[in-house]
Image: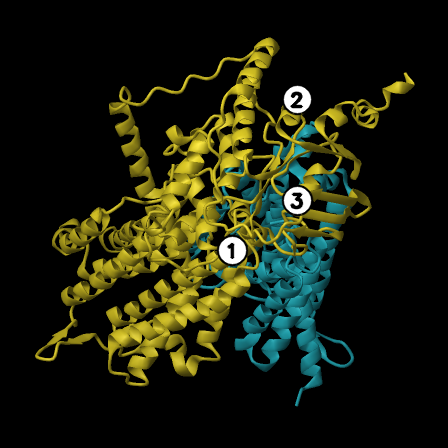
Chain colours: A yellow, B cyan
Amino acid sequence: MRQVMRRPGSFAIELLTALGLIAAPLILPYLGFTPTTINRILVWGLFGIGFDILFGFTGLLSFGQSAFFGTGGMVAAYLLTVVNYPDVITALFIGMIVAGIVGFLIGLIALRRTGIYFAMITVAIAEVFYFVEFNPLSEYTGGENGLPGVPTPVLSLGFTHIRFDNDRSLYVFLAFWFFVGMVIALRIVRSPVGVILSAIRDNPLRASAVGHNVHGYKLTAFVVAAAYAGFAGGLLGVMQGFMPPDAFTFDTSGQLVMQTAIGGAGTLFGPLVGAAVWLYLSDFLQTTLQLGATWKLVLGLIFVLLVCFLRRGLIGGLKDLYVLIAERSTKTSEPAELAPLPALTPEEEKVTRLALAKEPAPAPMPALHRQDDDAYSGPILQATSLSKRFGGLVANSNIDFTVARGERRGIIGPNGAGKTTFFRMLTCEMAPTSGRIVFRGRDITGLNVTDVCQLGLTKSYQVNQLFSGLTVRDNVIIAALAELRGKFRLDMFRSLRRIPGLDEQVDHTLALVDLTGRADRPVAALAYGEKRRLEVGLALASSPSLLLLDEPLAGMSPAERIEMVKLLKSIGQGRTMIIIDHDMDSLFELVERVTVLQEGRVLVEGTPAEIKGNKAVQDAYLGGVRAA
Amino acid sequence: MINWANFISQCFNGLVLGALLALIASGLTIIYGTLGVLNLAHGAMFMLGGYAGWLTYTYTGSFVAAVIAGALFVMLVGVVMERVVIRYFYTRPHEDQLLVTFGISIVFVETIRFFFGSLSKAVPPPAPLVGITPLGFMFYPTYRLALLGIVAVALLALYLVLYRSRIGMIVRAGIEDSVMVDSLGIDVYKIFMLVFGIGAMAAGFAGIVNAPVVSIAPDIGEGILVQTFVVVVIGGVGSFPGAVLGGLIAGEIISITSMFNPGYSYVMLFVAMTLVLVLRPYGLLGTAGRE
C-alpha cells in the first residue's frame, strides 16, 4: 500500500542519497559499470525524477517526455555552441526554463483529456517536436547532425577554476545536480501539493469534489516534469560534449517509461534504479555477450515479464518483501482487531436507539476557518424551479426547495424519484437544464463542484469515493487542505506540518467519525462501515456550512446504522444538513423536516410526523393500495 | 504558384493514405472500444502484416497469397496475444495495459529485426497493377488507385461485419457495456479474443497492401501508430465512423502539407488535433464519457 512519504524532521533519505552518490563511483566499477555508464545513469535518473512526479505520483502516463528533454538540451547546447554563451550552468537553467514554459503550453492542450487520450496526445506532440527539430528548425539544431562541441562546465571560484572535463569530475558535477533534484523532489512530494497529487492519482473526481483545482495541480506536475526533463537534457549535451538529435525520438520517451516501470514508479528512486539496470544490461549484452542489436529484444522481453509479474517494479517489490518479513516478525505485537459489533434483533435495536437518544452527544465540530457571514440571515440554500432533463427523460422538474440555516432536512422518495440528480445539481456536479440555485445569498448556478465546496457546500457520496490507495489520515488531510489552503496554491516546498490548524482539524474530524484508532490504516483495509464513516469524514473535514449526505446508511448492518445515526446526530449540531435515505426510522429521528420527491417533483414537505401520516406519501411508496 | 496537377495528385495520395489510416485506426478503436485496452503494439501489427506478406511473396510469388497470409498471420498473433497476455490486464489500471503493450511492440519489432535485419524490404505490386494509369488530366500510379479500392472494400467488409452481422451486434453491444453482454450469457472473453484478432488483422492487412507503396522496415509501425493516434483523437475513441472520417482528414492534411514542406506535415496534423480537442474534446464523432 502506498503511503504519502512523511517522516517529520528526518532527513534520512536525503542523507542516504548523498552517501550513495559518494559511494557509487567507488563501488560500481567493480560490478562492471564503466564511468560513462555511471554518468548516463545519473542523467536518466534525474530525467526520471520529474517523470515519476508526473506518472508515479499524479498518475499521468506521458509518452512524450522526449519533447522536453530535447528542448532543454537543444536550448542549452545552442546557447553554448552557436551563441558562445560562456556559462554552462546558467545555460542549463535557461534550457530548463524554456522546457518548463513549453511544458506549460503543451500541458494546456494534453491535459484537456485524461487516461489513454492523454497518452496518445503526448505521443503525438513528441512526434511533432521530433519532426520540427529535424526539419524546420534544423538550421538551429543541426538537424540530424545535432550540435557538436558543447563545452564542459567550469566553476569559477575567483582564485581558482574547477574544471569538470573528465568522467570522474563530470560525475561530481552530475551527482551534485542529481542530489539537488532529489532534495527538491522529496520536498515536493512531502508538501501539501505532493499529497494532493497523490489524491489526484487515486481519485480525481473526489479530489475536485473536496475543493482542489485538479486541472491546476496536474498542470503543475506536468511543468515540473518538463523542467526536470529540460535540465537533464542539458546535462546530456554537457556530458557527451555533443547534443544528439535522438534525444527527441519516441525511443527516448519509451526508454524513460520503461526504466521507471522497471525501477518502480512512485518512489522517485525507481527511474535511477531502472536506468542502472537498463544501461548496465545494454552494455553487458552488447559488449560482453556480443549480442549486437539483439540486446533490445532481450530488454523488451525482460520488461514485459516485469510488467506482468512485478507490478510495482524492483523498488516496489523490495518494499513488499520488506513489509512481508516485517509483518511476519511482529505478528504478535499487532494491536488486536476491533471486535465486530454483534448483529441486533429489532427489539434490541429499539432499546439501543432509545438509549442513544438519551446519551449526551459529543461536542460538535465548529467550522474552524470558514467565517460564516453573519450579516446574511436568509435561507442558507434556495433552489428555484430546478429542472434536469436527460434527452427525453425528465429527472427533476420545477423543484422549489428552501433550507433555513441550522436546519436538518431529510429527502425521501422511491427509487428513481430524482433524489441523487437533485443533489448532484445542488453541489454543481451537474448543471441544471433550467432553474437557479442560491447558496447563502449567492447564485451558484453554473459554478463547478470545486468552487462550491470552497464556498462551504459539500456532500458525501452514495457510493464511497475515497482515496483508497492512501491511509485514513491522508484521506482526511486531503479534504482538510482544501479548506485551509484554498483550491489552488503552489506551496510546493512547505512541509505539511507547517500548515496551521491542519493537525487539529484532522484529529478532530477523525475523532468525530470515530476513526482515530484507524488513522494509519490504508483505506483498503477498512471494514465497510468504517469506509462509510470516512466518506462522511471527507465531507466534514472541509468544515462545510451546508452538508449534503447521499444515503449515508446505505448497505449498513443494523448495528452500523445505529453508530452512524449517533454520529450524524453529533455532527448535525450547529450545522445545516440535508440527508437522503431510505431508512425512514433513522431519518425521521435525525431531521426536523422532510421533503418527499416523486417522479422528479416535490410531492409534499413537512415534519416527520406529518409525512408519516400523509396519504399521498403512502401511496407513492405503496403504489396506490387504496384501490385494493 | 501551385501546380494544379501536382495538387490533385497529392489529394489522391491523401485519399489513399487516409483510407489506410482509417482502416488501421478502426482496428485500434474497436479494440479499445470493446476491451478498454489501448494497444500500443498496433503499429507493430501493421509491420508484422507487411513482413508476413513479404515472406509469403518471396516463397510463392503470389501477391494475393501474400495479402491473405499477412492478414491471417496478424490475426493469429492478435488472438494469441489476447489469450496469453492481454486477458490478465483487463482488471489492471490503464497504465499497466499501456506499459505491457508497449513492451510487446518492442519485442515484435526487435524479433523481426533479429531475423530479417534492419534493411527495408520491397514487395512489388501484382503484375496487372504495375505502371501508371491516365486519368485524363493526369497520370497516377495504377497500384495506388487500386489500393484505394482495396482498402475501401476492406473498410466496407469491416463495416458489414460490425454493423450487419450477429457477431457485430454483440461487439457493438460490448463497446457500450461489456459487463451487460457478459451477464446475458454470452461468453464475452471469446468475443474479446475475436475482436482483438479482427482489430489486429485490420492493421496487418493494411501493412501488406501498403508494402508495394512504402517498403517495409522493422520500425515502420512507429510512425503509423502516431498517425493512428491523431486519427483516433480527431475522430473520437470507440467510433468506427469517427475513425474513417479522422483517417481521411489526417491523410489529406499530411499529403497536402507535404506538397509545400514535408517538415510541417506533423505540425499541421497537430494543429488539427488541437483544434478538435479545444472545440470538440471527445472527437468529431465521439461520445462524451468514453475515456
User: What residue does disc 1 label?
Assistant: A213
Which quadrant of the figure has residue B128? bottom right
Residue A489 placement (x, y as % from top left):
44, 59
Q: Nearer the viewer, residue A83 or B251?
A: A83
Does A493 appear above or below A409?
below
3D distance between C-alphas at marks 1 and 2: 39 Å
Q: Nearer the viewer, residue A347 or B70?
A: A347
User: What residue does disc 2 label?
Assistant: A585
Q: Which mark is residue A249?
A: none
Mark found first going from the N terminus, 1 or 2: 1
Mark found first going from the N terminus, 3 or 2: 3
Residue A53 placement (x, y as % from top left):
38, 54
Give the residue furthest to the right: A627
3D distance between C-alphas at marks 1 and 3: 18 Å
Which quadrant of the figure has residue A167? bottom left
3D distance between C-alphas at marks 3 and 2: 25 Å
